[in-house]
Image (cartoon, grey):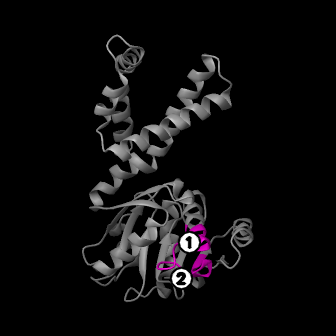
Amino acid sequence: MKITVIGAGNMGGALAKGWAKAAQSGKSEQVLASVADICVADKAQAILQKFSADFPGIRTTDDNSCAVEGADIVVLAVKPWLVEVVVNDIRSQIDFRKQIVVSIAAGITTEKLIGFFGNVPADANIFYCIPNIAAEFAQSMTFISSTKGTGKDAVEKVESLFKLDGDTLVTEERLVGPGMMMASCGIAYVFRFLRAMTEGGVEMGFYPQQALQIAMQTMEGAVALLRETGLHPEAAIDKVTTPGGTTIKGLNELDHAGFNSAVIRCLKAGLK
C-alpha cells in the first residue's frame, strides 16, 4: 500500500516513523514494501529534511494536494482546527472510490470529516482512529472506527497498517473518545505515575536515574506478568501481599488517598 501522512508533528511524526522503521526492517512487506511507499507532508522543511535523512527513500513534500496523488490511505494528522484547511487543499484530489481517508485528529469524527468534504459517496471509506505517541516504537494502542458504508477490505487494510505501530482495537466510534482517554491521554498519566515513583525513590535514597530505572522495570514486569498469566490485576496483587506485610500497608495508603477514584476521574475528565 502507498501511505500519505499529512502533518508530521508529535503524533503524525510518530506514526510515520513507526511505519518507516517497519518498512526498513523488512517485516512489513505485506503492508509496506519499502519506505518509498510512505509520503510525509508538512509545511516545516526542517521536519521533512530530518525524515529524508533518517529514512532514505521516503517521499516528502510541503504540498498537500501532491501528497495524496496515488495514495491508497491518506492519514490526516494535523491539529483538529487545521483539518478543514487540509481538506480544502486535497478535496479535488481525493477519489473515494479508490482511496481511504483517516482522521487521527482528536474530535474530528467521521461525521465531521464527511461534513468538511461534502458530497461524499455512501460507500466512502472514512475512518476516525486514535493512536498514541508510542507508535514510533511499535507500542501504540490504536482505536479504529469507520462509517457504516466502509467495506470490510478497507477495515482490514487500515488495521494491518496500524498494527505495524502496535496493538489495535476496531470499535464503535462512540468508544474512540474513551479509548483516547485511556491510551492516548493515558500514556501521559502513566508518565506521571512513573514520575511520582521516581520522586519517592529519590526521597528514599536513590539517585534520580536509578529510581526511574527501578520504576520503569517494575512497570514492565507488572505488564509482562499480566500478559503471560492472564491474571486479573487484583489476583496478581494477592500474590504480592502477605498478612501484616509492607505491600498491603502501601496499598491501603493509596486507597486512603483516593487513588482509584482519582484515576477514574482523570479518565472521565476529558469526556466532559
- Magenta segment boundaries in residue numbering: 19-39
Determine the residue positioned at 43% across, 37% down. Answer: 222
* Three-letter amino acid code at the position of disc 2: Val
- Decide: marks 2, 1 in contact (CB < 8 A)? yes
Q: Position of residue 5 (x, y in %)?
A: 55, 72
* Three-letter amino acid code at the position of disc 1: Ile
Residue at image mark 1: 6
- For the question of whether residue 272 can be seen, the reply is no
Against 103, residue 63 (above or below) is below
- For the question of whether residue 31 can be seen, the reply is yes
Q: Position of residue 105 (x, y in %)?
A: 46, 61
* Foreground pick, 135 / 242: 242
Against 260, residue 34 (above or below) is below
Residue at image mark 2: 68
Q: Position of residue 199 (x, y in %)?
A: 59, 24
Q: How many marks?
A: 2
